[in-house]
Image (cartoon, rainbow, N blue to C red):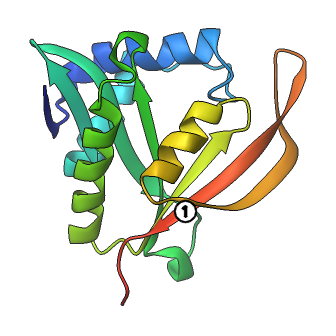
């Protein structure tokens, strides 16, 4: 397994991973599937801020980050996303992706990484906690999917002390 910067050609595999999660889980609150074209545009725009985990030539997961909130006061905080194919979970790929993403973020001057996690995804809360993220807030019933109200758990990790 290796972690590398995503390429535009990875967009179909990334779309397959994320669209299954959108369709079949409460990991994300969205119900709008992502097009290959929109993912390709994100990969191109984010450059080394978009990583994939690959094994035997197959993309098994991705991690990326983008703005947390608008405005110059938030310039050093970023919100990340990490998703793995079901077959890749529990094998250390997520940890490898996040470790690499944190290294990119530090080099990019990011001070804080934020995770917005569905309360219906306790394994993601445990995963982030194991990586040093701290729960800093819980927003009850801000998400809705499949006729259910869902809480958003906000977690953060301070990457630098400056």
User: What residue is shown with label 1?
Assistant: 156
Quadrant of the image occupied by residue 121: top right
Q: Is residue 35 visible?
A: no
Task: Name the spot of residue 149 as percent of width and height, x first.
Answer: 89, 30
Q: Where 113 sits versus 81, above or below? A: below
Task: Name the spot of residue 26 as percent of width and height, x first.
Answer: 69, 22
Quadrant of the image occupied by residue 58: top left
**Please, what secondary structure does the residue beneath circle 1 have?**
strand
Residue located 39% across and 21% down the image: 89
Q: Is residue 91 visible?
A: yes
Quadrant of the image occupied by residue 23: top right
Residue located 24% across and 32% down the image: 52
Q: Nearer the viewer, residue 21 or 15?
A: 21
Crowd tier of the residue under label 1, counting other residues whose Cα lies within 10 Å: few below 14, some 14–19, many 20 or above: many
Q: Is residue 48 left or right of residue 37?
A: left
Image quadrant holding the N terminus, namely top left
Q: Nearer the viewer, residue 144 or 124?
A: 124
Image quadrant holding the C terminus, namely bottom left
Residue located 49% across and 41% down the image: 127
Q: Where 9 sits versus 160, above or below? A: above
Task: Name the spot of residue 160 as percent of width and height, x first.
Answer: 35, 79
Residue located 10% across and 13% down the image: 57
Q: Where 76 sits versus 138, above or below? A: below
Q: Is residue 155 left or right of residue 137?
A: left
Task: Name the spot of residue 34 as percent of width and height, x first.
Answer: 49, 20
């Amino acid at each position: 397994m290796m972690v590398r910067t995503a390429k535009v050609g990875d967009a179909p595999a990334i779309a397959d991973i994320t669209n299954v999660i959108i369709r079949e889980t409460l990991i994300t609150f969205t119900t709008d599937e992502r097009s290959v074209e929109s993912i390709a545009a994100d990969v191109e725009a984010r450059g080394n801020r978009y990583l994939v985990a690959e094994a035997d030539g197959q993309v098994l997961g991705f991690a990326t980050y983008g703005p947390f909130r608008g405005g110059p006061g938030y310039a050093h905080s970023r919100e990340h996303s990490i998703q793995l194919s079901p077959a890749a979970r529990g094998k250390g790929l997520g940890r490898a992706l996040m470790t690499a993403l944190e290294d990119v973020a530090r080099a990019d001057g990011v001070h804080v990484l934020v995770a917005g996690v569905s309360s219906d995804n306790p394994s993601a809360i445990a995963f982030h906690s194991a990586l040093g993220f701290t729960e800093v807030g819980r927003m009850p019933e801000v998400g809705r999917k499949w006729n259910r109200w869902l809480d958003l758990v906000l977690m953060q990790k301070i990457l630098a002390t400056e």
